[in-house]
Image: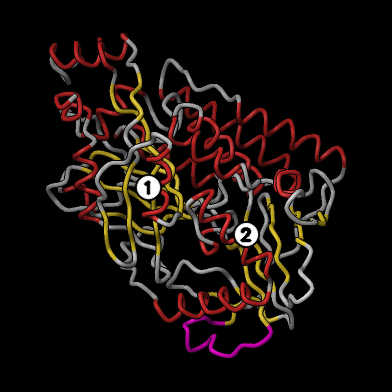
Amino acid sequence: MNAGLKTHWEPQPAGAAWVSQIVEEYCSRNSVLRDFAGLLATHTGTRLTDWIDHLEVCTTDGLPDAGFTLAADGWYEHSGALLPPIRVSGRRSLVLRVDSVSDFAVTCSHRFPIEVTGRAGDLLRTAWIARSPEAEVHFGVIERIGCSIRHAAPALNAPEKQQLQELREQLRLRPRQFDTHEAAFQSLSQLLSSAIRTVGRDIVCDVFFAGERAFWQGRNHAAQVQYMRQAALGLGWGNHDHHTYRSSRVCFAPMIALFEQLGFTCRERFYPGHNAGWGAQVLEHPICPVVIFADVDLTADELAGDFAHQPLAPSRALGTIGLWCGLHGEALFSAGMHHLECQFSFAAARQQLADLGVGSMKPFTDFPFLRQCFTEPERWPVHESRLQQLLSEGLISADQAAAFRTTGAPGSHLEILERNDGYRGFNQTGITEIIQRTDPRLVQTAH
C-alpha cells in the first residue's frame, strides 16, 4: 500500500474463520494446548488467537479461498487482515509470542514439561511444550528480538550479546527531561543512531519499545495489575496491539522522523472528521510486531495534507491532545505513552479487571469485529512549572490551573481491545468520542 495514504480496512471473515478452524482442530488434537487456552481465559481474559505468532499446517487446503497468498519467502499471508503467517511444512504447530522464553519456562514448568531451544541472549528462542500421548500438534512459544520467524535470525557472539544487554539498559534509562525539544530529539536520535550502528535497526526497535512499555507500566495501575496476570503464565506483553503516542504540534514531525529512523513506515493517516480537532498517523514496522498510533491537534485544513512530515506551527488554543502534552510533557519523553492497547476477550477482561478493582470507561467501539474501551484514567500530578507556562500563554484559566494543581489530570490508560474477523483498522467515530471524553478540562470539571 502507499505509505501514509488513508487506508480503508474491512473485516475478513473467511480468513479469520480458517484460522479459527485450525486452532479448534489443534486444541482437539493436543490436550495441553486445550488446557492452556482455558488458563488464558480464566487467568488473563485473553484467547489463544490474541497470542499467535505463526502457524504450521500440513496442507494448503482452503488457504487461497480464505484470502491467503503465497509470499516469495514461502509463507502464506493475508494482506488485508490481522492474521498470523502460515507455513505449509508437513507438520502441525501453533506458536505463541511471549516477551521471554525463559520467563515462560520457569513460570510454567510446574504445569507441563518444557524444552527450551537456543542460548541465553539469542535473538530468537523457542520453548516447546511436551506433547500429550495422543497429540499430533506441536505447541510452543517464541521470543524474537528484531527478527522474523520467516528469515534466519543472525547469530550473536558473546561480545555482541553483552553489547545488546548494555543497550537494553541504556534505552530503558535514557534521559527524558530536557530544556528544549530540539535537545531532546537530538539526544535520542544520536543514541539510536549509535545503537543501530552497533547491533542493527530492527534489534534496536524491539528493545526500544520493550523499554517504552516498562516506563508506561510504571505509571499505570491497571497495566501493573494486568501485567501481573499475564506474567503469572510467563507471557509478558506479547498480546500488544498498538502503542499510542501523543505529541504537541511542533514535536509531531520530529517524532515521526525518529520512528522512521527505527524503520517504521507510515501505514495510513487517520481522519476522525473535519470538526474533531485532531488527527493521527498509523505506523507499522516491517520486522518487529509493533504498530504505533501517533495523534496530534490539527485544524480541518491540515487533515488533507501530509501532517506527519510537514512542520506544524504552535497553536494559540489547545485541543485535548495538546493540553495533555502541556500538562504532562511529550509522550516520547517525560510523559511516556498515553496508552498501550492489547488484545483480549473483551467482556471477560473487563469483568476480571473490575473484580480486581480496576474499572473501565464506557466502550467507545462495540462492533462484532471490533470492541474497545479504556480503563479508568490514571491521574497524574501536574508540575507547577507546567501550570505556570500554560497560564502565561493563556492556554488555561486560573480556575483550571487551581483544579489541576489540587487533583492532578488524567494521564494514561490501558486499552482493552477485541479484534474479530481479522479486522486491523480503527473506529474513527468512536475514537473521536473517547478523545473528547478524556479531555482534562472536561474530566476535571466532572471530578
Q: Which residue is most to the right?
A: 158
Earlier residue among tags 1 and 2: 2
Q: Is residue 183 left or right of residue 236?
A: left
Q: Position of residue 126 (x, y in %)?
A: 75, 57
Q: Secondary structure at mark 1?
A: helix
Is there any visible trace of residue 26 in the rendered image?
A: yes
User: Where is residue 88 shown, x and y percent of the image?
Assistant: 67, 81
| 133 left or right, relative to 196 | right
Q: Quadrant of residue 25?
A: bottom right
Instruction: Between residue 173 and residue 66, name the one nearer to us.
Output: 66
Magenta stretch mostly in which secondary structure? loop
Q: Residue at x 82, y 57 (%)?
A: 115
For this view, does 429 lie left or right of residue 122?
A: left
Mark 2 residue crowding within 10 angstroms, few (<14) / some (14–19) / many (20+): some
| Mark 1 Cα shell of 10 Å, populated few (<14), some (14-19), many (≥20) | many
Specify whether residue 392 is in view.
no
> Disc count in the image?
2
Q: Which mark is residue 36?
A: 2
